[in-house]
Image: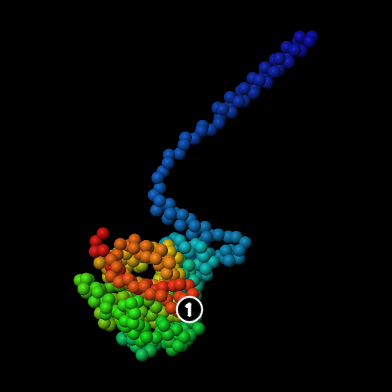
Amino acid sequence: MAFAMGFNFLLLLAMAATNILSLYHLSLTFQSPKPSPPIPIHIPQHLLRHLNDIRATINHLTASTSDPKRTSPVPHDLILHSQVAPIASSCHRHPYLLRRYMNYTPFSTCPYDLDLQETLILNGCHPLPRRRCFSKTPPKPTSSLPLNPFPTALPDSSVIWTKYSCKSFACLLQNNPIDFDLNARRSSLLKYASELDLPVNRFMQLAKSANFVIRLGIDIGGGTGTFAALMKIFYNVTMLTTTLNVNAPYSEAAAARGLMPLHVPLQQRLPVFDGTMDLVRCGRAVNRWIPLPVMEFMFYDVDRVLRGGGYLWLDRFFSKAMDLEEVYEPMIGKLGYKKVKWAVANKTDPSGLKNGEVYLTAVLQKPVSR
């Protein structure tokens, strides 16, 4: 009896073991085969960067969080524009401002949002997306504009003054004479009072002695365009003036004088083709407050647009004396330009005395060939 029970128990164990082995075999049979390793596909780095920019833009355009600024609906024209034209990658850092800018009624009058536009541009969102609306114009535009770039007065009717504290050019002349006293600016560009000064006629003589003709140029941070005006009336040189409407209508003032304003920030690539400019002048807007990477990229963009033998003119660039020696002079030196003029003097206003600042006026000539 005991033998029979033991034998039956062994048979039961054998059957159980057989079933377990069968199930294991079946699991191996029906298991999906191990996939072969993927074949690596080479994607160019510039394409990856472009795809990342597109992905970041789409993510910010469609983002939805508990922040009420982020849950506002994405304007239809912003989505439409993103499908037909690129949006600057820096715009995705300011999705709320970008949505405000693109929140308008198509085919009607555009919102007059100059402050919003300048904020976006100064934060690197440039060029701004196009809008399908009609820009506002001054209510009573003048029937004639001055042909002389140094008129006795600029026409107030050429500006929409809503966003400015001053409501006339006379007010600007009183409160901001450095930029809007046209005759004073003219005199400062024609006189020689110290080594920092380089009168326009003296610069043109330098170019002539080098058998180089000045015909086209860009004045970076040129305000209301006084340098461009002098080059136009005395030497028939066409100058483009980059400017922004920060607290004053600089672009309208330049245009009222018959000059060409370019509404671009310092970090923007100059919108002209390679090797086409004879001169690039940097006024006082180019100084130590510009981040170093922005300035370095700007210098090499200047090199891009200058033709061989062209001139880079730094007019009263200011920085701390130590930084000029250790940072800016080596940065400029990397360009490999000839030093036609290099003058340094102390900046004697309160800020300059407090911070140990100096001025630099330099004229540098690009090599004729690389």
Q: Residue at x 76, y 10 (%)?
A: 4
Q: Is residue 34 depicted above or below 226 in this figure?
A: above
Locate residue 172: give its quadrant.
Answer: bottom left
**What's the residue at 62%, 25% (across, down)?**
23
Question: Is residue 14 positioned above or below 237 on the image?
Answer: above
Instruction: From the viewer's side, name the closer residue of 333 and 283.
Output: 333
Question: Residue 280, how many percent across, how many down?
Answer: 32, 71
Q: Nearer the viewer, residue 114 or 34?
A: 114
Is 11 left, or right, of 291 in this rendering?
Answer: right
User: What residue appears at the point 48 percent right and 55 percent down from the top-left corner?
Assistant: 55
- What residue sits right under mark 1 in the picture? 350
Q: Quadrant of the N terminus?
A: top right
Note whether residue 276 is visible: no
Question: Which residue is nearer to you in this view: 366 or 233?
Answer: 366
Name the secondary structure under disc 1. Answer: helix
In the rendered image, is residue 206 in sight?
A: yes
Amino acid identity at mark 1: Pro
Image coordinates of residue 182 in percent, x first then y, are 37, 85
Give the image location of residue 152, x and y in percent: 36, 90
Q: Residue furthest bottom?
A: 152
